[in-house]
Amino acid sequence: MVVALECSATATTRSVTVLLELPDTLRHDFHMGGRMLNVGADHWLAGVERCPSSNCDDRTDPADISLIVVHGISLPPGRFGGDAVKQFFTNSLDCAAHPSFGDLVGVRVSAHLFVERTGGIVQFVPFDRRAWHAGVSRHRGRAGCNDFSIGIELEGTDDAAYETPQYESLIDIVIALMRRYNSLSLSEIVGHNDIAPERKTDPGEAFDWARLYGGCLARLDDFRAAHRH
């Protein structure tokens, strides 16, 4: 299967076309997994851990949810597991606990979602609210991506391979979001580095965009086939 997607336009108007060539065996593997996540009327994912953060506010237009931003984070850098990321997003991190936390004093940020190395999903902010995840950013000429985006943090680093359960959970999340918010599409999924290239590098070279797109396309095929019967 060959699929061409116009994937992103950065603040420097760079345009990237992602060409996916998926062998039948790989396509089959994508079809084998997957769970059905649902976004409730309260804009929270059902059945995942909730860890409410105050690092959010009202969207300028609550109906304008048209971009998904993929991030990468680990605290301390390169160390996985533990509660440091959750504590950081909820303003409860002890910044004296590790030397690398010194730059985080007074910083108030949060993504909507955090995907752990195990594939576990934590939600901090309901999707109809503006989470403070993107910072100074621009996408397709629009500044302030927090206004119209959903931020998803993956536990990881730029140069360490992300785990299979993380891709599986991310695919589940993207499909659930696309089913709930009609303005979202596969062509509007970007990395933090795409919308803030002068400041950010995450999710990094280690992130496999073809794996994400291929998994989502296969899942969408499954849904279409199910609805035909």
Image (cartoon, rainbow, N blue to C red):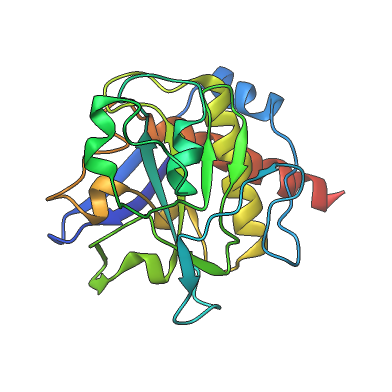
- 128 displayed left or right of 98: right
Please say if 124 is above or below 101.
Answer: below
**Residue 40 screen position, x and y as percent:** 75, 60
* Residue drawn at 81 percent across, 51 percent down: 228
Residue at the front extreme, as displayed: 96
Would residue 201 be seen by someone viewing this image from the given angle? yes
Question: Residue 188: which quarter of the image?
Answer: bottom left
- 228 displayed left or right of 110: right
Relative to the observer, which residue lies in front, 196 or 139? Answer: 196
- 93 displayed left or right of 118: left
* Residue drawn at 67 percent across, 29 percent down: 31
Count the numbered circles shown.
0
Relative to the observer, which residue lies in front, 103 or 11? Answer: 103
Residue at the right extreme, as displayed: 229
Question: Residue 47: which quarter of the image?
Answer: top right
* Residue drawn at 81 percent across, 46 percent down: 226
Please say if 76 is above or below 4.
Answer: above
Would residue 213 be seen by someone viewing this image from the given angle? no
**Residue 187 screen position, x and y as percent:** 41, 55
* Residue drawn at 81 percent across, 52 percent down: 227
Residue at the bottom extreme, as displayed: 61
**Residue 116 screen position, x and y as percent:** 53, 29
Relative to the observer, which residue lies in front, 7 or 204? Answer: 204
**Residue 12 screen position, x and y as percent:** 12, 59
